[in-house]
Amino acid sequence: NAGVMQNPRHLVRRRGQEARLRCSPMKGHSHVYWYRQLPEEGLKFMVYLQKENIIDESGMPKERFSAEFPKEGPSILRIQQVVRGDSAAYFCASSPSGQAPEYGQYFGPGTRLTVT
Amino acid sequence: AQSVTQLGSHVSVSEGALVLLRCNYSSSVPPYLFWYVQYPNQGLQLLLKYTTGATLVKGINGFEAEFKKSETSFHLTKPSAHMSDAAEYFCAVSGRGAAGNKLTFGGGTRVLVKP
């Protein structure tokens, strides 16, 4: 049973470019969460999605960041016009249902974004 | 609002010694509590969780944690450290129901194991 898949594992972008991070949840999981880990900081919640719905985006920066989880295919975290401060590790997690606390969240290996 | 405080950003232990990582939380509702471990350049792996019931929770790799409501603590312990325990450990809290779909993490504790 494959775990949470994220790609790419490493992504280098120049300032002003767009970054697209992909996340495929574990088989049977329909809930996806994105977290960001800035250097020397802990993980911060960004957004919680179900298929075709954003449930909670309270942790998303107001500008340049967006997320989707289409009916088919992986969840995408999109960062437009990246800046150096976006350099971080971005983790995706999934859970089997809305009762996430009962099951815990299962994390992918992360995408390490470097903005030059 | 919820918050998690992990005392000590770095802990050094000798191989075979007790590992004790401290976690205190703040929550206005009965919380769910988690410990995750992160090895270098990897994702987070769930070590153990407290949801309801027994307050002493056993996890993988010989770790356990005890939920103490009166102290708002969820400290992680392992009786005997192994070299493979060198990693960063994160304590996390979530609420229940709709509020449970967001983990709030502590700042992490990096564990160094000395031979």
Image: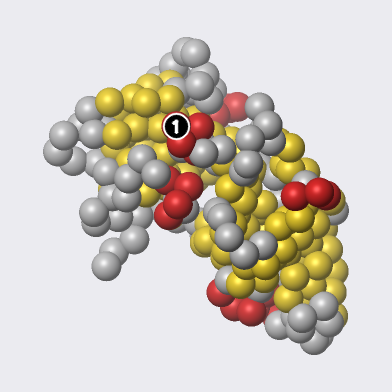
The residue nearer to you, when weighing B84 against B97, is B97
Q: Estimate the x, y position of residue B66 in percent, counting from the top left.
A: 72, 63
B102 lies above or below A52 = below
Give the amino acid at mark 1: Ala
Total number of numbered labels?
A: 1
B79 lies above or below A67 = below
Secondary element at tag 1: helix
Q: Counting other residues with Cα less than 10 Å from the Cα at mark 1, is it few (<14), some (14-19), or many (20 or more)?
A: few
Q: What coloring was used for the rendering?
A: secondary structure
Q: Estimate the x, y position of residue B70 in percent, counting from the top left.
A: 81, 49
Q: Is residue A19 visible?
A: no
B82 lies above or below A18 = below
Q: Chain letter of disc 1? A: B
Q: Relative to A58, is B19 on the left or the right?
A: right
Judging by the rendered image, the residue that carries numbered circle 1 is B98
The quarter in which the N terminus of chain B is drawn is top right
| Residue at x 68%, y 31% (from the top left corner) | B28
| Residue at x 79%, y 72% (from the top left corner) | B19
Q: Estimate the x, y position of residue B46 in percent, counting from the top left.
A: 53, 61
Q: Is residue B91 visible?
A: yes
B23 lies above or below B12 = above
The single residue placed furthest to the front in the displayed view is B53
| Residue at x 34%, y 61% (from the top left corner) | A3
Q: Estimate the x, y position of residue B53 in percent, counting from the top left.
A: 58, 60
| Residue at x 20%, y 32% (from the top left corner) | A70
The quarter in which the C terminus of chain B is drawn is bottom right
The single residue placed furthest to the left in the displayed view is A72
